[in-house]
Image: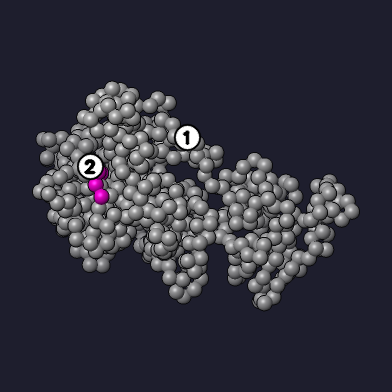
Amino acid sequence: MKKSWIGVFLIVLIVALVLTACDVQINDGKIDGIDELPVTAEVSGLEGVSGTAEVRLLNSTEEATALAAVKEVYYVADGAEIYSVDVSVVNNGEKVTLEKPVTVSITLPSVVTLPLDQFVVFHVHDGAAEKIDHTVSNGKLTFTVKTFSPFVVVPAHTHVYGEWEFIGGQAPACGESGMQKRTCVCGDEQTRDYTVDHIDENNDGKCDNCGIDMGGSSVNPDDKTKPGGETKPGGETKPGEDTNPETVVIPTTYSRNGDTVYFGSYPQTQMTDETLIATLNGLAGGTPGRTDDDYGWTSYQYYHGTGDEHMRETTNEEDYMWYKDVEYQGNKYRGVYFTQYRPSLTVYVIGQDKSYSYKPTNTFQYRNEYRKTVTYWFRYEPIKWRIVEEKNGNALLIADLIIDSQAYLNVAEYVGLDEKSNSIYMNTNPGVPADTYANNYMYSTIRAWLNDTFYNTAFTTLQKSLINLTTVDNGITSSKPINGNDEINWNKGTRFLCANTQDHIFLPSEADVTNPDYGFSDFMERYANDKKRIRKYTDYALSQGLWAHGSAYTQDVLYGEYWLRSPLQQNYDNSGYGVACKVDEEGYAAGGDFVINTSIGVLPMLWINVGD
């Protein structure tokens, strides 16, 4: 194998030139009294490449610029150990563009105070920094790249959160709920709903704080309980809190505490422990897209467009985002890896600078701090559900968190204009009857995804035996009119309705999320913001491109949007073509979105048998 080492003599010469330009003195073979050079690098795998590898240290201005790009995407503490180097391949004085991946190994000086596995590497190019997967061996940080420019090595950041504090500053009364948050030094915030429990430490049957009669049963303050008073499956584990490598206990069937049920499992919390991540990367065997078998990774086969924002051209199923499940020390983890960003609409072509929406930095994956060619790991955890109805030994469950982010329909075809010049979008996919509108739930890809991909991922064979096959109402009763006597105007939109379906898993309808019996504000309040309808989300949903946002109404706490199975039709005459209903981050339930939007979340519902 052809290798290019930058020897000590060459490094000293290059450093001398750089530091001379910066008015830094070199004395007695030392740099400002330091006995060794800040960083050296080696490049291998240059067979067939015309050129020679060159390495130079960045001057102070260049390093400050590169570090600023890193700080745009990653937290770096003031005074942290920073190392930077510029690597390039040069032929006849000109930089060479590589046609294949090569390996770069960086050696840090022995005065480094942190272990090498506690550093991360960033590649800075075109003014942006991208985190690079790397390994540590033989005292070197080694990684594979196809392009050169400055590399910056910074200490890995692990979130260190402060104490939980109630938003607004004042705790609720005993038995009441409020929202808490805690903040990391990097500015990242975590939020949770928290119920203040009654405490009876002296076992006199009364709450020590408010004096309420507790019926003689005391509450042990040492109990391992979730915020809200629900027993935590697996001890202290909670979606949204990274407590790895603690083992998460998944109920064999389900566990219940009042109206809360834990049933099934799905990837949720992102792992941040670098040692655990390195172990999981090793179990994965490698990253996809480089071998014929992709090291056993499975392509999501997500869609990527042709660039026609108006859906006059088709979109394509492509291999650019993969997943792989591994087990380690009693836990199951899902790895996620992608080589290009998932577009917010399936018709977009990310990277073609046609408009704001096409830029990689404006994708929701990028905004959610997920980057290309980095492997992320998410732990499978019990899915938390709320019981909204119970009868005859069966319970209707709705997910407590947005568990994923998917398009309602992957491909919608523009077929022309109607008599009012509204654009018409149809579902023309193979096997779909002619004249099927794009927002028809029966033939939607999200319905197929729920009853195949999600159903087979989240539930064991035993758990599936508890899930009822349900006749799902997709008629006018599931999508109510504007008011009780507006059937005439409402009937203008019934063309978008579909027949009832037989499903194990289904999306909520507009009627479901406006049903007071289910704990929501009623249908007449669907235009109002409603905190009973808003939903938090899992880390995994963010990795799939969920749009998480907040407002003054939510006190800037971020929430997600989620699909409803109902087509958008009321009060819009014929403008509902290609639009399905959704609930937004403020709990507003009267809007909708294009069915090809991938940034809207999935909040599933199902009926299960809970016995007598």
In the rendered image, the residue lying farthest to the top is: 211
- Residue span colored magenta: 255-260
Q: Residue at x 21, y 29 (%)?
A: 215
Kind of residue sitting beneath label 2: Asp
User: In the picture provided, is 264 more to the left or to the right than 471?
Assistant: right
Q: Main secondary structure of the magenta part?
A: strand
User: Mark 2 = which residue?
Assistant: 259
Viewer-side residue, 316 vs 260: 260
Q: Is any atom of residue 40 visible in this view? A: yes
**Label 2 or label 1, whichever comes before in sequence order:** 1
User: What secondary structure is found at the residue carrying circle 1?
Assistant: loop
Q: Are marks 2 and 1 in contact (CB under 8 Å)?
A: no
Image coordinates for residue 79, horizontal then vertical, percent: 67, 42
Viewer-side residue, 84 vs 215: 215
User: What secondary structure is found at the residue carrying circle 2?
Assistant: loop
User: In the picture provided, is 543 more to the left or to the right than 158?
Assistant: left
Q: Residue at x 22, y 64 (%)?
A: 432
469 shown above or below 215? below
User: Mark 1 = which residue?
Assistant: 163
Kind of residue sitting beneath label 1: Glu
